[in-house]
């Protein structure tokens, strides 16, 4: 089972979409520290959005607060020239949430009129009120 992590920061940059010969697509989002303390060496963390998840970056702009839910992926590659192993670590983004200054989500709650009737219907006998 893979552990899932969250990181909240300020959007530094949304990198260009990369499309590879295989058809695989990838786009990186770089976040910097989200705190009020100015530091000489802020963290710049790159998260990789892959395949359909690149659509999550369409409306993201520099300076926005964002929370990324991600998994840590690692792999090894053996250099055919030297025979030495190289190790790569990737922060694979699973979800993106844009935040207001107070930390609340900028994504609106669904309108109850948009919720399917079968979700709202149900047995109310076990309600505590």
Image: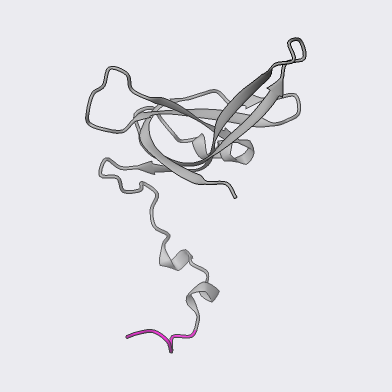
**Quick check: 86 above or below 9?**
above
Q: How many numbered tags mark residues here?
A: 0
Asked if the stretch drawn in magenta spans residue 13, the answer is no
Q: Residue furthest left?
A: 37
Q: Nearer the viewer, residue 84 or 65?
A: 84
Magenta segment, prevailing SS (helix, strand or loop): loop
Q: Quadrant of the C terminus?
A: bottom left
Tell me what residue is drawn at x 77 percent, y 14 percent.
80
* Quadrant hosting residue 110: bottom left
Q: Give the left or right position of residue 98, taking residue 80 as reference.
A: left
**Quick check: 83 above or below 117?**
above
Tell me what residue is drawn at x 52 percent, y 73 percent.
119
* Quadrant hosting residue 23: top right
Q: Residue furthest top?
A: 81
Q: Where's residue 128, x and y in %?
A: 35, 85
Tell me what residue is drawn at x 70 percent, y 23 percent.
77
Residue range corresponding to the magenta coloring: 123-129
Q: Nearer the viewer, residue 95 or 89?
A: 89
Tell me what residue is drawn at x 22 percent, y 31 percent.
36
Q: Where's residue 81, x and y in %?
A: 76, 10
Q: Nearer the viewer, residue 76 or 48?
A: 76
Asked if residue 17 shows in the view, the reply is yes
Q: How is the image coloured?
A: one colour
**Quick check: 89 above or below 70?**
above
Asked if residue 96 shows in the view, the reply is no
* Quadrant hosting residue 113: bottom left
Q: Where's residue 12, x and y in %?
A: 39, 25
């Amino acid at each position: 089972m893979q552990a899932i992590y969250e990181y909240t920061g300020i959007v530094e940059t949304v990198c260009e979409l990369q499309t590879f010969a295989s058809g695989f697509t990838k786009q990186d989002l770089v976040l910097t520290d989200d705190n009020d303390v100015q530091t000489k060496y802020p963290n710049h963390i790159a998260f990789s959005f892959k395949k359909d998840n690149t659509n999550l970056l369409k409306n993201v702009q520099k300076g926005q607060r964002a929370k990324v839910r991600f998994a840590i992926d690692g792999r090894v590659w053996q250099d055919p020239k030297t025979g030495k192993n190289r190790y790569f670590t990737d922060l694979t983004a699973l979800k993106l949430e844009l935040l207001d200054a107070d930390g609340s989500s900028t994504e609106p709650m669904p309108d109850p009129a948009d919720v399917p009737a079968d979700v709202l219907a149900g047995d109310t006998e076990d309600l505590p009120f």
